[in-house]
Amino acid sequence: MLGFDSGSLTPHRATFVRRLSEMAGAYQDGAAARAILAGGDDPVIYLGYDGDVPEEPGHLLFRTTIINPGTIGSEFFMTKGHHHVRDSAEFYLGMSGMGVMLMESRDGKFAAERLLPSAVVYVPPGWAHRTVNTGGTPLAFLAVYSGDAGHDYASVERSGFSRRVHRGQAGAELRPEASSQGGPGGTAG
Amino acid sequence: MLGFDSGSLTPHRATFVRRLSEMAGAYQDGAAARAILAGGDDPVIYLGYDGDVPEEPGHLLFRTTIINPGTIGSEFFMTKGHHHVRDSAEFYLGMSGMGVMLMESRDGKFAAERLLPSAVVYVPPGWAHRTVNTGGTPLAFLAVYSGDAGHDYASVERSGFSRRVHRGQAGAELRPEASSQGGPGGTAG
């Protein structure tokens, strides 16, 4: 059963929690991240629930994720982002809150789609993907993916995404990785 | 975007419609089915929308299905039911209405799960599956499955499921295929 407001999944096989200390390097403003941690705080960036399915070929894994609202510097809370080890698609359904899905292909194409309640976002095979909470409340969503997809976080840790989502004067803004002060990115969600 | 009340999916690549004439042989009471068709009626049993995704390995197909309320004789409107050609799982999410998922493995194990709004029903690899609308309103649900799953309707047409869902005095009842008048099946939904 899905709890659309809370992001809950019952029953579930496991829960997962990602705190800032596990992904501080993912944010552009490393000094802001280090300052939070040095102050003794280690906020939960996101958490979620894994469906009770074996991680094997032929199966479909499903999980819910809840990204808390907040920023590191001006960059919105987000997932680490990953490629699949075996290029395969992922199906997303927005449950509550407001966010954006960043997608980037191995040859450098970029796309962003709004992740809103009842919105379907499809990540094609071979595209790295990262979800970002651009709202003031938790962002909850469902993901369904192949049992043998596998998660490759390392390549995203190395190269990142070409755009980041910051809180700007007009709301959420997509900004190129190279710039910390805005640019030709456009509005994200 | 999913329309949870109506079962709509936008955008979609295609729509599909299944009328009684395409599946009259699936119902236990063949005489009742033939009488409806002979009377000039050919009701839509179910219809739905396919997401805009290529039917290829690595992709995940998704569709919504809406089963109308009704019975043929006393047997509730249902899908044809199918195996996947390549044994692979299917993820279901109830959107609106009330129903039941029938599942049967190739070695004859049987299971039934309620399909209600927000309910997740997981069909493991290798299990044939059929959805049944046991309520008085349309039953809408989402399905996600592997791009190379394929649909094998013929084996279900040959052998059917070992249980059927009929309207009984106490509501929906699971009845063994051999009996048209009830038996040790239990209550379905």
Image (cartoon, coloured by chain):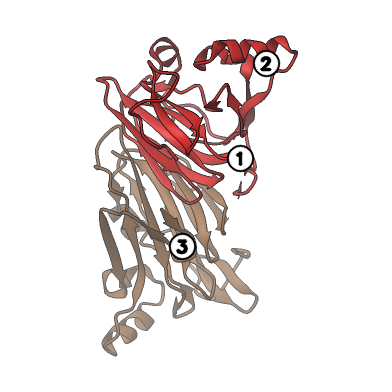
Chain colours: A brown, B red
Label 3, on which residue? A140
Residue B60 image-quadrant placement: top left
Q: Is residue B48 left or right of residue B156?
A: right
Q: Which mark is residue B177?
A: none
Query: What is the chain identity of the residue bearing mark 2?
Result: B
* Mark 2 and mark 1 on one chain: yes
The spot of residue A81 in percent (x, y) is 38, 57
Count the numbered circles shown. Answer: 3
The quadrant of the picture occupied by the C terminus of chain B is top left
Q: CA distance from mark 2 to mark 1?
A: 20 Å
**Viewer-proximal residue, A9 or A73?**
A9
Q: SS class of the residue under badge 1? A: loop
**Viewer-proximal residue, B28 or A134?**
B28
**Viewer-proximal residue, A56 or B49?**
B49
Query: What is the chain identity of the residue bearing mark 1?
Result: B
What type is the residue that disc 3 sits on? Ala
What type is the residue that disc 1 sits on? Gly
Label 1, on which residue? B136
Of badges 2 and 3, nearer the viewer stands: 2
Label 2, on which residue? B36
**Crowdedness near tag 3: few (<14), some (14–19) or many (≥20) residues, C-alpha within 10 Å:** many
Query: What is the chain identity of the residue bearing mark 3?
Result: A
**Crowdedness near tag 2: few (<14), some (14–19) or many (≥20) residues, C-alpha within 10 Å:** some
Vertical side of A58 occupied by B33: above or below: above
Residue located 30% across and 32% down the image: A58
Residue located 62% across and 65% down the image: A187
